[in-house]
Amino acid sequence: MTTFFSFKADPPLDLIDYVVGIDADSWLDTLRRGREVLRDNAQKSAELLLNPLEDGEFLQTHRLAVAAFVAGLHGDTAIYRLYLDLLERSEQGKELSPVIKNLLRRGRTLGPYGAYPAGPLSVEDLNGSGFEVLDVNVDRSLARALEHAHFLTFHPRDASVQALERLKEAGWTDTGIVTLSQLISFLAFQIRIIHSLSVLRDVGPTAGDILSESPS
Amino acid sequence: MNVTEQTVSQTDTQEPDRFTKAQLDWHPWLEPLEEGNLTEAHYEGLVDRARAKSPYFRLLARDPEILGARTRSDKDIFYNVAGGLPRRERELAATAVSRFNGCIYCASVHARFSERQGGSPAALAALLETGLLPHDTDLKWQLVEEIARRVSETPVGFSHVHIRMLRQAGFEDAEILDLINASSFFNWANRLMLSLGYPTFPSE
């Protein structure tokens, strides 16, 4: 039994089960396996994005830094700790961990906010803060990626072609931007699943579920 | 903004300035792959070959493996009808999340899907227009809409209170899980749709 999460664990660990603390054959395990294709592909997505066979232009350490940052922005401690731990155990990740912790001190806010195209929805426009990574010790492409992560986490409706241009100026290619966007957006999904399953875990099964499985 | 410039661009491809059930087009800000250059690995990621016609999916096909995992997740959440939440409610959750995050394109598609599955056209129209369901809407629908919204807040606002409310209203745990899955998934989908391109009314 490992005491920390690893994508390379044998037998393999399901990240969501690991973080939420779902044991095999428990009521939550049974519930999750009612949507087995989703369960498998949520895990596969995490592996493809965070433990890729080939880094491509997006280094694994940088992927883990983005993941720790996004989880920290959501304020969900268990998944934040897991990604921070993976970051610290990755190549050159030790130096990045304090950087991420520091950025999180001023990065956290409430979302979603942002502006709509001018018109009847303008009354719903909500101003919120932008976010810049000014630390000169952070690699330029990672700095722009973290800024993009903050924007996409909190105010995606402020999207613009300029946000993508800023990434390109820091060396991101179209394909790299697609992968980065998938990572940040996937994390918004995964963190919500983890949060919600943890709430279910805390509340426990309905009385009826203890005696018999709920009919479907 | 220069007034003339705006007028010219609006006559060409008009960007919607409100939520609508109308069919919209979506235009990428980055270069999608060309249909003629797609290989088997790309089609494996697209899952449905017909998706090769869509510039959105051809853009995501730049990373075909993650597109494939995303698409298979999407299909199990919204199309697996072995138990769980009725499809019109799953699509209502997708619409409510899209409305809350501000994805005009996603909201239009999924309001139509919910309606096609038997969802109330008037309730969906009100949700798109005001961001909320009318007060006289069915309690289950009100709960689906509220939970979809809570799940979409950052930090996530979904709590034990919501589970109690759902169970009291008669939702089974398999239905609650579908609601969590559908709501969480649209936080993935909305962010891609919003940040990689923009919607317009069809050009013709």
Image (tube, rainbow, N blue to C red):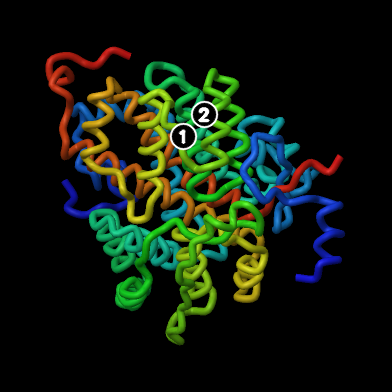
Residue at the spot 59% in from the left edge and 41% down from the top edge: B106
Instruction: Name the image quarter holding residue B122.
Output: top right
Label number found at residue A173: none
The residue type indicated by label 1 comes to: Leu
Q: Position of residue A120 (x, y in %)?
A: 63, 52
Instruction: Point out the residue furthest to the bottom here.
Output: A136
Residue at disc 1, secondary structure? loop
Residue at the spot 49% in from the left edge and 31% down from the top edge: B92
What's the chain of the residue with tag 1? B
Q: Is residue A13 visible?
A: no
Q: Position of residue B8 (x, y in %)?
A: 87, 59
Q: CA distance from mark 2 to mark 1?
A: 6 Å
Given residues A39 and A199, the one toward you in this image is A199
Q: Are the residues flagged by discs 2 and 1 in contact, CB closer than 8 Å?
A: yes
Quadrant showing the C terminus of chain A: top left
Given residues A14 and B113, the one toward you in this image is B113
The residue type indicated by label 2 comes to: Ala
The residue carrying mark 2 is B123
Given residues A51 and B81, the one toward you in this image is B81
